[in-house]
Structures are given as structure tokens and as C-alpha cells.
Image: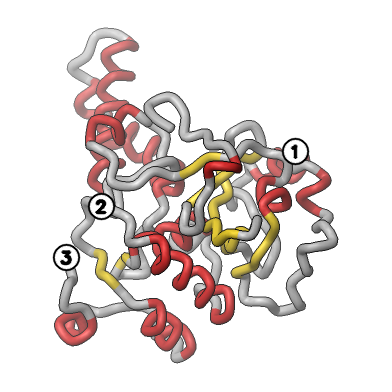
Amino acid sequence: MGLISNRVDKKNLKPGDHIYSWRAAYIYAHHGIYVGDDKVIHFTRRGQEVGTGTVLDVLVTSSVPARAQVPCSTCNPPEEGHHGVISSCLNCFLAGGVLYCFEYAVPPALFLAKARGGTCTLAASDPDDIVVHRAKHLLNNGFGCYNVFKNNCEDFAIYCKTGLLVLDQSTMGQSGQAVSFVGGPIAAVLSTPLTLITTNAYGMAATAFGVYCASRYAADIGMRRDVAKVSVEDLTTRLAAGALQITEPNLPALLPHAR
């Protein structure tokens, strides 16, 4: 892994790794937690992998390999009404794609060099045994309602790795991939006044890209101040009670290590 690619060989995987595989000509990536014994725990919409939640999914649906739609004999299909967190063998998770490993605690320079989100974060990972515990607990209890921009497969994997959740569920989740999807148009709008002082297309592009990088950096889970450490047991209790959103008055009692 490094600046150019996070590609990793299967033999180098260890339990607790956050892995992903690109889908549909790199339009989006599917994320999960490798827990050992050739198994990956990942979050889907009621057991079915979904794409971007946009019109691009027309392309996604037509390009997903057939093997992704027909689980192998070792992967039990989820029951009807399943909560969405499932366990698959590594091959079914990859669906014919290439295996990559998400990086944690990367230096700011490396984070910005990887201009597309969904591959790394500035946040540090917790120990592998805690990561696996969270993933297995959520496999049995769920991770709430799937939402492409606020609660997706990358959000699930990042939570398993860090224990961090966004306090206000009305805002963007932890996913760097989702930030990239919305960050481009936002950067273009925000940079419009600045581009008026430029005289060529290169200057306008550089300005927009700079705004995009700054917004992506500020939105990373390792930099945000609207996140808190939440135990997986407390998370599932709140999900069961329909009270996932964490409000400021509860922070001192709930999260002594809130950032």
C-alpha cells in the first residue's frame, strides 16, 4: 500500500482489516471488515449490495459481475427483512473485483495526495480484536437504516475500526467516499467567486481543486469535532430504542472521551 495504490494480496490480510473493492469502473467502492477464516462482515441495504444512490446506478447495475448476484454455497442468503449487516466469503464480497485495504492514521500530505475519498483517513484505528468484536456484534444486531450519504458500508467499516460516530445524524456521515461525491459540486460553487480573478481554465481548475481538498480534509472523521466515541453495545441499545442521534446534553455522561 502507499501513495499510488492500496491494493493488497489476500494472503496478507489479518482479522480487523478494513477492506474494499471498486465497482462499476471505479464509480464507487464496497467496504467491509475482514474477520478471518475467509469471512467479511459488511453493511448493505437489507442484504443486497447497492451503489451510489444516484442515476449512476443504471451503469452500476449493468456492470456488476454475475457472481456478485449469486452467492456461493458457503454464503447463506439473508432472510427477508434482514437488517443489512451480513457475513460473506471473501470472494463473494469482492464480486470479481480487486482487493484493497483502507489505511488509517495517514499523514495529511498522503491524505491530500489521494484526491479521491474512500481510501484512507487521518483517524487512528483501534486494536484489531476490538474491531472484530464490533463487526460481529453488529452482524447480530444491525447498524441502523442504510443511507448512501449518511450511513453506508464505509461508515460501517470506519465505525468498526474507530468507534467514532457523527453526533448529528442529519449531517454527512463518516464516509470519505460520500464526501467526494458531493464535494466536487460544492467546491465548484464555493470557488466561483475566486475563479473570477483567474484568467484561464487552469487557474479555475486549480482553485476548485484546492477548495475541494480543503473541504475533504475538514470533513475527514479524523478532523471533525462533531464525532464521539460510542461503544458498540450502547450503539445497538440506542438503535433498538430508535434513539441513534446523540445530542449535546448527553455527551458528558455518554462519552467521557468525546473529542
Amino acid residing under circle 3: Arg
Q: CA distance from mark 2 to mark 3?
A: 10 Å
- Please report the residue visible at 47 percent of the width from the left and 34 percent of the height from the top: 6
User: Of the numbered discs in the image, which one, if any, rests on residue 63?
Assistant: 1
**Where's the N terminus, which quadrant?**
top left
Disc 2 target residue? 222
Q: Please, is residue 33 above or below residue 1 in the view?
A: below
Label annotation for residue 100: none
Q: Which one is nearer the viewer's eye here, 161 or 224?
A: 161
Marker count (numbered):
3
- Frontmost of labels 2 and 1 is 2
Which of 9 and 109 lies nearest the eye of the viewer?
9
Among numbered discs 2 and 3, the one appearing first in the sequence: 2
Q: Residue at x 68, y 77 (%)?
A: 82
In the picture, which quadrant includes the C terminus? bottom left
Residue 38, placed above or below residue 176? below
User: Which element is circle 3 on?
Assistant: loop
- Left or right, 253 with respect to 206, comes to left
- Label located before the other in sequence (3 or 1): 1
Crowdedness near tag 3: few (<14), some (14–19) or many (≥20) residues, C-alpha within 10 Å: few
- Placement of 158 over or under 212, stated as above or below: below
Q: Amino acid at mark 2?
A: Gly
Query: What residue did someone put label 3 on?
Result: 259
